[in-house]
Amino acid sequence: MEMEGYPKYVALKDGEQVILRPLLKTDEKALLEFFVGLSERDRLFLREDVTRPEVVKGFIENLDHDTILPIIAEHEGKIVGDATLHLARHGWTRHVGQIRMVVAKDFQHRGLGTTLARGLVRHAISLGLDKLMAEVVDNQIAAIKAFERLGFQKEAVLRNHVRDIHGSKRDLVLLSNDVSHIWETMEAMVADFSPTLGG
Amino acid sequence: MAKNEIRIGGLGGQGVILSGIIIGKAASIYDGKHATLIQAFGPEARGSSCSAQVTVDDDPIGYPYVKKPDILVVMSRDAFTQFVPNLKPGGMLLYEEELVDPTDLPKGVKKFGIPATRYAEELGRKLVLNIVMVGFFAGVTGLLSPKAVEKAVLASVPRGTEDLNLRAFKKGFEHGQRSVGV
């Protein structure tokens, strides 16, 4: 699956320029460096131990753009953000996409997360998806705000679902963005019906 | 450019009328030509037959009804059966190749097929099949500039759906260009 409109040059809130582009197979070393450079707290929210070279290698080698669309943010040759859109191409949730995102500490609170997520939301809509999901731990206030700015709302809270770096249980917030109304408008346009016109 | 009469036929819900609106808009607003549109709906929204008659000309159009189209675009078997007898000999038939089996055509008709529904599904939404068809029309006929049609597509679809519709247009356009060997 092609991702159109990339690479994209964007300015962050403070004017710093970053490049957004799809992850390439040649990014293995840079991606590993990015993950290793994340704070332990940030890595805790990831599903795998991405500091292990074999995990990153496997991720890169098995890149399947039909199910995972990764966008990275690059600054001065280094990866400073990674956002992925996960798709279920078959089954009962194939109309739903899930966004996952992690940003380097130096680039947090500068609008990069919102920029990355916005790109993926737009791409998800262009794929015809109805609904987008994101999982955020309850104390990731900036991330929650970033998603809310893009139309996400809290849909559910899983109590004591994750453990933070200190071993304390925290709530996992499920955010969703129902974009199906866009398609309902389109559906009405192609209905080929008007109660007042005819012939 | 000589006057071109186009009929688009299909079923309610396939976006037949919107296709006609986009082609007319591309011609008249973005390509500096004249265009008229006549639309005909069935009694129900979905599944009943409907059609659009579009006339495109460099000169003002005095009579908007299309009796013998130069170009027939069909998205359903019923539309093909109903409209093909009136297709002008030597004219052009553009059809949804997985829904229409074009036989008994008037003499000299050139036919071009596209799996528009499948393409639309592969792109993510079946409802953009009409935009695939519009792209195919632009690619095969060369009647309108692709830029004009692209602009008309973007000006006609709901906000937020532009990217998918643009991809649908390109998919149809490229298939059309391949079909005529461009």
Image (cartoon, rainbow, N blue to C red):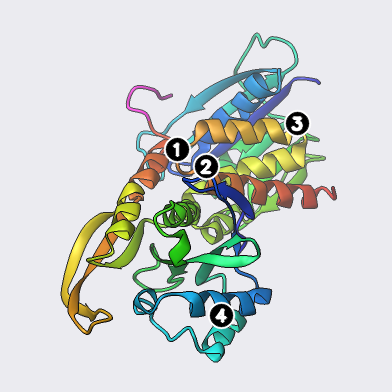
Q: Mark 4 and mark 3 in contact? Answer it, CB < 8 Å.
A: no
Q: Secondary structure at mark 3?
A: loop
Mark 1 belongs to which subunit?
Answer: B
Q: Amino acid at mark 3?
A: Leu
Residue A107 placement, left or right of A33: left
Q: Residues within 10 Å of mark 2 (few under 14, many from 20)?
A: some
Counting residues from the N terminus, which is met first, the one under dot 3 or under dot 2?
3
* In the image, residue A164 above or below residue B97: below
Q: Amino acid at mark 4?
A: Leu
Q: Residue at x 43, y 66 (%)?
A: A105
Q: Nearer the viewer, residue B161 or A169?
A: A169
> Which corner quadrant of the image does residue A78 belong to?
bottom right
Q: Residue at x 71, y 23 (%)?
A: B31
What is the x, y in percent for residue B162?
52, 42
Separation (CA) of disc 1 from disc 4? 38 Å
Image quadrant containing the N terminus of chain A: bottom right
Q: Secondary structure at mark 1?
A: loop
Give the residue number, with chain letter if any, for mark 4. Answer: A32
Give the residue number, with chain letter if any, for mark 1. Answer: B159
* Marks 3/2 same chain: yes
Q: Residues within 10 Å of mark 4 (few under 14, many from 20)?
A: some
In the picture, the disc for residue B162 is: 2
Separation (CA) of disc 3 from disc 1? 27 Å
Q: Residue at x 55, y 42 (%)?
A: B79
Q: Amino acid at mark 2?
A: Glu
Separation (CA) of disc 2 from disc 1? 6 Å
Q: Mark 2 and mark 1 in contact? Answer it, CB < 8 Å.
A: yes
